[in-house]
Amino acid sequence: MVYFDHDDDKPREECGVFGIYGNHEASLLTALGLHALQHRGQEACGIITFDGKRFPSERHLGMVGEHFGGDLRQRLPGHAAIGHNRYSTQGRTMLRNVQPIFADLAGGGFAVAHNGNLTNSRKLRTELVKDGAIFQSTMDTEVILHLVARSTRPRFLDRLVDALQKIEGGYALVGLTGKKLIGARDPVGLRPLILGKLGEAYVLASETCALDIIGAEFVREVENGEIVVISEKGVESHRFAAPRPSSPCVFEYVYFSRPDSIVQGRSIYQVRRRMGHQLGLETPADADVIVPVPDSGVPAALGFSEQTGIPFQMGIIRNHYVGRTFIQPTQTGRQSAVSKKHSPNRAVLDGKRVILVDDSIVRGNTSKKIVQMVREAGAKEIHFRSASPPIVNPDFYGIDMAAKSELFAAIHTHEEMVKELNVDSLGFLSVDGLYKAIGEPQRNPMQPQFADHCFTGVYPTPLVDNEHAEADKERQLSLLDDA
């Protein structure tokens, strides 16, 4: 983690990772996989391969299709590769912060890319720098690389385990050595990682849609606290953390995953439709038409329409040829793209009582502009509905979400939100309603089935860096401060 100024009102995306071992078109397949995962990050992309001797690599600012085409197999030869799509949540957007990153370690080269955030990376980084480590980027991913390099364990796998046992937070990582493709998922399974197979080759990816685009079959999800090692011997599984209940990020269902992906055996599209069904049950309104905020509000709006019998109409038309606004790093930049993103369909809106359905509200800025646009198109009434609960807490695990002081629902009462948005009514899906739509009877307060901290304030892991956030806010190595 995302339109009109829609992206400004969204939890901006995590990153996407992809890896493949055992196919001599590894770079081409990785580029295709990253293309399918483009929605997870559009600021930068990179691929590293292994050709039997070297680790050829390319890293670029921009999107996959702009850089990885043509003679890619000649530029990035090899039977194994890892790739990454970036939306920056730790470290600003600059070429040195583009993944995968690589280092020559004792025993050979190691490339790594990861999706997520380490919640103790600042603390670890400070300790590593005091001990003489030299950082070349501002990414928390580089902390993992240094921890592996400094481990004194004899085998590479043991050194990686050593490193993973020192970090906290949410992450899914793919790594590449001269002999192995490696995948690992954090101990509570916050960030997604799946295992697939294409012929004799094995694949790691953030979502099943990346398997679909290359014709690979889904094997299973990598478990929380698990390392999978893929080599000529096949797939080996190792645990680096004691078994515990998983707590995947609920925003994979709400927003991040592509609608055609399958997560935990559940169709994302169908879950989002059921969110709309549940939203229609919990927050009905008398209206003439239901209009989604495209594109992410479409499945929930369909479900709302099916539940209530109110016609579904495309009352807002999205221009798909304008880049997503969240890739622009400043608020001003995002807002300047707003009017290019969406246009009102006046034939649907004029004189109508409209229910606007979106997947979530973060800052509220975009929602205000969409409401204003719909009113100016002649809507008689506007009832705004969010297919997720109110977002009242920030995320620290890889979602670039606003600070609590910027979260619309955290700083306004319900009545204030209605007034600020200039709507006739406002409704949110309940937390238990969200769980029901996903397929759970209700939320288990003693052991939540999902990481739902943005709604509930219950964080699944220690927030080590956050305890000293004000004293250490935005601190970087001096040489990188203005890079």
Image (cartoon, rainbow, N blue to C red):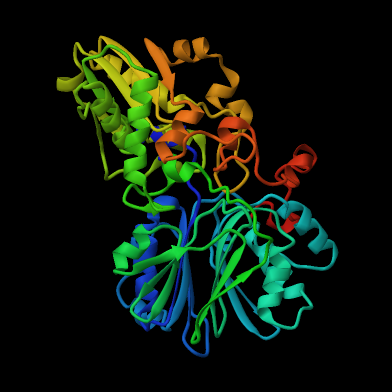
Residue 19, position as x, y percentages in the image: 46, 70
Residue 349, position as x, y percentages in the image: 21, 18
Query: Outermost residue, bottom direction?
Result: 53
**Quarter of the picture holding the C terminus:** bottom right
Q: How many marks?
A: 0
Q: Is 203 rendered above or below residue 109?
A: above
Q: Say left or right for 34 vs 346.
A: right
Q: Say left or right for 138 vs 271.
A: right
Q: Say left or right for 232 vs 188.
A: left
Residue at 21%, 15% in the rendered image: 288
Residue 152, position as x, y percentages in the image: 79, 78
Query: Outermost residue, left direction?
Result: 347
The image quadrant of residue 283 is top left
The image quadrant of residue 358 is top left
Q: Is 94 rendered above or below residue 443?
A: below
Query: Outermost residue, front direction?
Result: 441
Residue at 31%, 38% in the rendered image: 295
Which of these two is toward me, 192 or 55?
192
Q: Is 74 rendered above or below residue 161?
A: below
Examine the rendering and report whether any part of residue 67 can be seen.
Answer: no
Query: Outermost residue, right direction?
Result: 130
Residue 423, position as x, y percentages in the image: 38, 13
Examine the rendering and report whether any part of residue 99 can be seen.
Answer: yes
Which of these two is toward me, 207 or 441?
441
Q: Say left or right for 464 vs 200.
A: right
Residue at 41%, 24% in the rendered image: 367
